[in-house]
Image: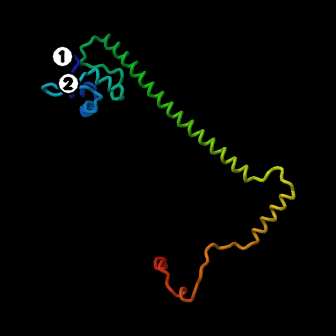
Amino acid sequence: MSDEGFVSIESAARTTGISARTLRYWIATGKLTATAEKRGKRVSLADVERLGRMTGKVSSTAVSPTATVPPSAVAVSTNATASVDVALMLERLDALYREQLDAKNTLISHLEQRVADLEQRHAATALPATATPEQIDALEARLSAREAQPAESPITVVTTPETATQRVWWRFWER
């Protein structure tokens, strides 16, 4: 196996500006591949830079000072990688946009249904536009008769001389 392009985690951290702890985390989670050597793990500098660009930890124009590739090849690979990264980002943004659009459409249809239900309830309780004056007078008479009746209390309280002098238990906390 060729060691070209593979560096230690610490060296990759110094070169790219990404912390060694972050690189170890990426290795542990499987985002970054590493090979075990006698002196520790080694990672591909190109993979570190690519992953750093994808996560925003490294600018897309950063070029490794330890790269042994000619500058023209670096420019071509950087442009190809950047276009792939842009395509991935566009796909993610499109998916997020579609999810938000679906959520908004669901909310709109729910609200439209609610408005229709409320309009239907309003129409059922509203006085018909073709009501005659006799019907209106009859409804007003029924309403005034109901208002004239005393309100019935659903709870009847019976007070006896015994219960009037007893101390109610919750009165203790009202002090």
Q: Residues within 10 Å of mark 2 (few under 14, many from 20)?
A: few
Which residue occupies 59% across, 82% down? 158
Q: How many labels does the image show?
A: 2
110 or 37: nearer the viewer: 110
Quarter that holds the N terminus: top left
Is 125 situated left or right of 51 in this image?
right
For residue 13, what is the image quadrant? top left
Instruction: Tell me: residue 61, above or below residue 157.
Output: above
Image mark for residue 159: none
Residue 69 is left or right of residue 106, and the answer is left
Question: Looking at the image, is 40 positioned above or below residue 143?
Answer: above
Front residue of this view, candidates 130 and 41:
130
Identify residue type, mark 2: Thr
**What residue is pinned by disc 2?**
35
Q: Is 85 drawn above or below residue 130 in the view shown?
A: above
Tell me where residue 140 sits by quadrant. Answer: bottom right
Q: Label 1, secondary structure: give it.
A: loop
C-alpha gap between disc 1 and disc 2: 10 Å
Q: Give the image location of residue 106, x and y in percent.
A: 56, 38
Crowdedness of circle 1 by 10 Å Cα count: few (<14), some, many (20+)? Answer: few
Q: Going by the picture, which residue comes out furthest to the bottom?
A: 161
What residue does disc 1 label?
1
Residue 104 location (% of width, % of height): 55, 37
Residue 96 image offset from top left, x and y in percent: 47, 31
What amino acid is labelled 1 in the image? Answer: Met
Dot 2: what SS? strand
